[in-house]
Amino acid sequence: SKPDEDLLGSVLQEVAGKMREMEDREFEHHKIVLGEYRDKRYKDVEPLGDDPDALTYKAGTDETVVIVKANKWNNANRRNQRSAAYTNGYINSLLEGTPLQRMAIPVGTSITEDALRKRKEDAIASMEKEDKEAERAARAAARAASSADSEEKETGSSKDKKDKKDKKDKERPGSAKPGAKGGSKAEEIKEANKLRRLQEACEAKAAQLEHVRKTAPRDLTAGGGAPLARHLEDLRAHAAQCVRDGVPSVALDAELIALGHLAEAIKREKPAADAAGGSGSEAALSVDRHVKRAFVAIQRALVNCRSCVTGDKATQLAEYASALGFFDLRAAIDAIARGDESGAQEDDKKDKKGKDDKKGKDDKKGKDDKKEKDKKDKEKDKEKEKERKALKKSLGFQLPDQSSIRYQVEQAAEYLRRPAGVEGDERVKFRPDFWQKRLLDIVDSGNSALVVAPTASGKTFIAYYVMELCLRAGDDGVVIYVAPSHALAEQVYYEVQARYTKNYRSDSEHLTGIFCTAWREHVQECQILVVEPSCLEIICMEPKYSAWLRRVRHVIFDEVHSVGLAGGEVWERMLLYCEAPFLGLSATLGEVEGFHRWLSDVETRRGRKLHLVVHNERFNDLSPYVWTESRPETSRIVSLHPCWAALRRLSPGTRWEFPTDFRLLPEDCVRLQSAMAESEQEASKKVSDATDALSPERFFSQRLENPTFDISMRDARAWEEEVKKRFCELEYPLQRSALDKISKTSEEACSAVEASLSQASETQYLKDKMLPMIRSLQRSDMLPCIVFHMTRGNCERFAIEVSSLLRQEEEEEHLKDGHAALVQKQEKKVQDLQKALEKFGWSTSGDKPSEEQMEAAGDTLTALESAKAKLYTLQAVDPRFALIPPGQTQLTPEEINTISGRRNFFDASRPLHRALLRGVGVHHRGLTRSYHMTVCRLFRMRRLAVVISTETLAMGINMPTRTSVFAGDSVFLNGMNYRQMAGRAGRRGFDLRGNIVFMGLRKEKVQRLMNSELPTLTGNLLVTGTCALSMLIKQASIYSKAEHDLILQRKTLDEKIDRVDELLTPVVAAWRLNKGMGDAEPEETARLAALPVEDRAEELRIE
């Protein structure tokens, strides 16, 4: 009927309204923020999760009504996906500008048993082959060491023979390569198509480069050079993409455009730097950064686009190299352009050889050679001077001469070429290193592994490989991920949801589950379970989980070095209880050999092998510094030489040896080699040949083909070992003299810090100096940073104090420039425009205007919106008085609300919330979960510059930062925590170098931390009273198969009896009602029970 239809329509409208409200309140703004974030900054990034689709609701029996704009985000899986929207993988994809592709695992089995068996066989064969090759290489190295001279002669002769053979092969007719001139018609067509595709790719990349050039900011000098930095990054990214796509010519064009911008910047800022005098001024620091960027751009062009360095492009590169003062690099560029890349190096080697053979010549010939050489040098100097004048006239500047080899290892060491991975492996989407490939083979072979590798070296990939393997193998397997803390467990839980998605046949099955001290979800219904160690012990001890534990395929123990910390007995018990193969991951595991032996015995009893995988090379180095207020503002961050920290170990009675994990950065090696040379010069008026041979110019020129622009990190490692070996060979007086020279600045800076700490308490010192220290980091391009301090209350005080000081500076500046008057003027303008709108009939009560009113007031409405926007900008936080990460914009309350996931999260009355607008956050266990999540998301998205934290961000949390600051001393700041906290800096894929800054620590503590060794692992008392009782309870619940079958039969019988009882109860009740009997009739019940079955049935028959 009509009333019923109207009622149904009104009810449906009400339901639709409620659904829209729920969507707006909980879900829609998350999709909106990702869309806005994408549109504003990254064009190709799609929001996480599937597109929302309509829900269907049944009204009545057959009719189906579709609720408009309702979506499936209100079920548990979609809520988990929403929470995963700000995890590491997704945020990394936003920062990189590439969308995160969540891996969709098909239902059931996508990897067959035969494929798994084949992988296992291949992995075992590969590991056996590698072991044999390693043994063979070790034997060959031993033989080579015993007969080095004969081997060298044999190698030289064989090389001569090979060169002669190659020469004959080239001269032999008919030796042309297939596919060259004279090839088949098919090969010619194939080559033509290849050239055509290359030409099309070049045109497309050239058009994209033109777009990048045209969309560059108009004023590259504004904002302290931020627009220039962003444009240079765009050009670098485009050049890298061109190299990957096989179009190096366009990549070279992009590098030349970047060099042009940098040359203009140097020309513009160098006069101010010269006028300021000294290398510590702001202008001088800016010029140094531009020079480094220009050198690295030339370096990239020569390494990646060498085949295109010809003609005018080679001339431009050579001019830029000469203007920067790298004339040796200019010679290398000229040699590459001529096609004789080794020409410049051969000339240098000939000169060196001439110097070495100089003594063997007679005096007369030596004098003639010297005159000739002096004449040539004078001619070269005249040509250089003429070229300098021409370059200064054309480019507007000319820097002093400097060695490109020394510059690489001393000033641009973070840009040294990293080692490339081995050949591609189909099991992963990147080129794994050798040790990573071995990890894949260990997992596929079904064995366990103990992995010890530095932070940010790439060891966590194996955990996600194990998860993917389990998900693809079927729906029954389970992987357990053991995290040491609740924060890390929650992060991994959401990270897995951001990486994978899988549809199951049943709604009761789930992809992920979590079991931690705070909450649990889908523990027995998931395939990937993230747990804390104590919670895993509950699972292992509970009898009800026994069947579920048999489904576990792998257990991943992250931060397994926690076995040596408080509560380590739980880790030991879990390593003993878990029957499945496991992976133990750690960056700071001490006593590796003993721990490996113990676990090997355990695994051998289980019929498996435990492989030890140790990788000592960190992908990005860490540079230690100390902050002191005793120096000028531009040079308050003082570099600490690692040898200074080891100075107290040096004694005349013992031979000096470097610890096995003692690392020297390339710039540290430069300083140490120079100090050794100076000490020898002072002691004996000459530098020994062994020390002089370790100068970077001589060392790399003799060993590398292109040392002027292509030194790798491994080459620097080899040089480091030689420098340390030479230092150990020196006598004690020379060692002491060299260390005194390189330790002078470090000693002075730490002494100044101790003097300041003696005048005020540590807390007051940190509170007063926190903002100046952060300003120093900002000036040195070392933000974002995490400031580690072990006291919760002080973390909050420091953040509030920094925010208050920034606000005071803002107010003082606004008083000077009349900011309040500007705000009042803009407010009056807004009020006037609102009154003007009222004249057109607009109501201030919020009623919707008519179309005629909107058309009449169109211009006024536009002016009002513009005035409101300007007023909002004036009333917001001034970006000059906020800590903004490089390349980012000012944070707003709306953005904080959006990223937090709550519409009204930001509360201006709370000091910690106001500090977020200034770029400062706090993290410790005493804060609310919503604030924790917001701070982590903002920091991972590079929207916060500073987070002041306790040790909560040290253990495994993925919070990539450029700098780790240690503020103040604490008994909890030991070697283990120091390494964990320092490892947050310089994460792979984010920065090229990590920084460690000590603030408010005394000299002895700094030296102990820098020299700290990992603690020795000791066993724990595994069996406690509670543990023994739990084991007895579980043992009592374990039955044999026969007992289990008997109990199951009894349980089935009991269930049948209960079911019969349920059926009889209403029958008895009806009979009593029919007979008019009440409940309290025990005599009648007893009489019926005594009757035979047939008589009782007859009496119970209901009429």
Image (cartoon, grey):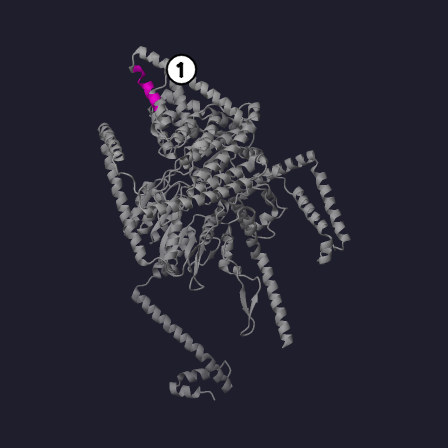
Give the farthest residue toward the right. 839
Q: Is residue 1021 visible?
A: no
Residue at (39% x, 86% y) in the render: 1091
- How many marks are shown on the rendered structure? 1
> Taking 333 as reference, is 767 left or right?
right
Say which quarter of the image contains residue 794. top right
**Label 1, on which residue?**
375
Residue at (69% x, 38% y) in the render: 819
Judging depth in this view, the residue of 72 and 1054 nearest the camera is: 72
- Please state the horizontal and vertical placement of residue 585, each as a whole percent of the image: 38, 45
Give the farthest residue toward the top. 364
Indicate the amino acid at tag 1. Answer: Lys
Boundaries of the magenta span: 349-359
Q: Is residue 288 visible?
A: yes
Magenta-span inclusion, residue 598: no
- Please state the horizontal and vertical placement of residue 244, each as a whole percent of the image: 42, 43
> Taking 943 as reference, is 594 left or right?
left
Q: Which structural element holds mark 1? A: helix
- Please state the horizontal and vertical placement of residue 595, each as a whole percent of the image: 33, 43
- Please state the horizontal and vertical placement of residue 612, each as a whole percent of the image: 32, 44
Residue at (55% x, 40% y) in the render: 214
Q: Quadrant of the N terminus?
A: bottom right
Judging depth in this view, the residue of 301 and 1053 nearest the camera is: 301
Say which quarter of the image contains residue 799. top right
Magenta-span inclusion, residue 355: yes
Most frequent secondary structure within the magenta stretch: helix
Judging depth in this view, the residue of 792 and 660 nearest the camera is: 660
Q: Badge 1, how many Cα within 10 Å: few under 14, some, many 20+?
A: few
Judging depth in this view, the residue of 1039 and 523 nearest the camera is: 523
Looking at the image, residue 109 lies above or below residue 1101 = above
